[in-house]
Image (spheres, rainbow, N blue to C red):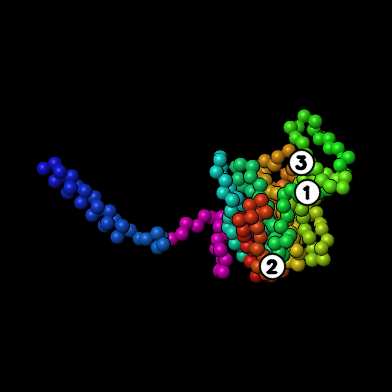
Amino acid sequence: MKKFYYLMAGIAIVAGLILASSVSPSVADKPKEVKTYQVYAENRKYQDYEDGVAKVRVGAGRGMVVLNKFFPSTVEINAGEKVTWYNPAEVAEPHTVTFMKSAEYFAAPEVAYAVPSTTTFTPLDPSANAEPTVIPGQDGNNIVVVANARSYSPSVITEDGSVLRIGETNYADGETTYEMDGTENYVNSGWLWPEGQSPPGTQPLDTFTVTFKNAGTFDYVCIVHPWMTGQVIVK
Ligand SMILES: [Cu+2]
């Protein structure tokens, strides 16, 4: 007899679940939750704005979990408007915002240079647990591996191949600004760290603001995590 009650109770629960699922609207029918800081304009994605500037988060994460994505990955703006990228992660994971005309402009973080084998290297901080990577080379040279400024530092390569360091006057406050006309071969934010979390010896960069002067579709990538991609559509 007990078994019968359990069976009936089971049937009642299943029937209840079926009824509940049939009367509640599907997830797709529910109105999307819109936070007050998001605006929705015709032909635009959900975007965060602050003082009229579209805001894009580069990565996210707390504790040991890091999310390597741009949020939102596509923004739409009008010509003359700005986008600010910032790193909101709670862990010191760096990202870049890098526009490249072609893959040949990808800037690796470390690059090999030939130097005379008589060259000696003395660390500025003698107590640092560090030594340069030096590999025996040829013709009286050694090969040293050094940090690539075009990867770490805010950099532009113009249409005619000139290399510019950008934003240097603002390094102290972590902000880099740039006006992009779209002819550039390469525009790189440099490594963006969560505010106050840049490691000693690195530039304390945490935001990158670009004014897009002309219409177009501008794809970008994080050169630390090349699977992180984003897009700015300028109308
Ligand atoms: Cu990244």
Mark nearer the N terminus (3 vs 1): 1
Judging by the rendered image, the residue that carries numbered circle 2 is 79
* Whether residue 32 is situated above or below residue 199 in the rendered picture: below
Mark nearer the N terminus (3 vs 2): 2
Residue shown at 79%/63% (left/top)?
A: 158
Judging by the rendered image, the residue that carries numbered circle 1 is 112
Residue 125 place in picture, x, y as percent: 80, 33
* In front: label 2 or label 1: 1
Q: Residues within 10 Å of mark 2 (few under 14, many from 20)?
A: some
Helix, strand or loop for the magenta stretch, by majority: loop
User: Distance between the Cα atoms at labels 3 and 2?
Assistant: 45 Å
* In front: label 3 or label 2: 3
Say whether marks 3 and 1 touch (CB < 8 Å).
no
Q: Residues within 10 Å of mark 3 (few under 14, many from 20)?
A: few
Residue 76 place in picture, x, y as percent: 61, 65
Residue 121 place in picture, x, y as percent: 84, 37
At numbered mark 3, what does the secondary structure look like: helix, strand or loop? strand
Residue farthest left in this picture: 1
Which three-letter amino acid code belongs to the residue tagged 1? Ala
Residue farthest front in this picture: 138
At numbered mark 2, what does the secondary structure look like: helix, strand or loop? loop
Q: Which residues are magenta?
A: 31-56
Residue shown at 35%/60% (left/top)?
A: 25
Location of residue 82 (image quadrant) = bottom right
In the image, taking residue 134 as reference, residue 44 lies left or right, namely left
Mark nearer the N terminus (2 vs 1): 2
Residue 133's label in the rendered image is 3
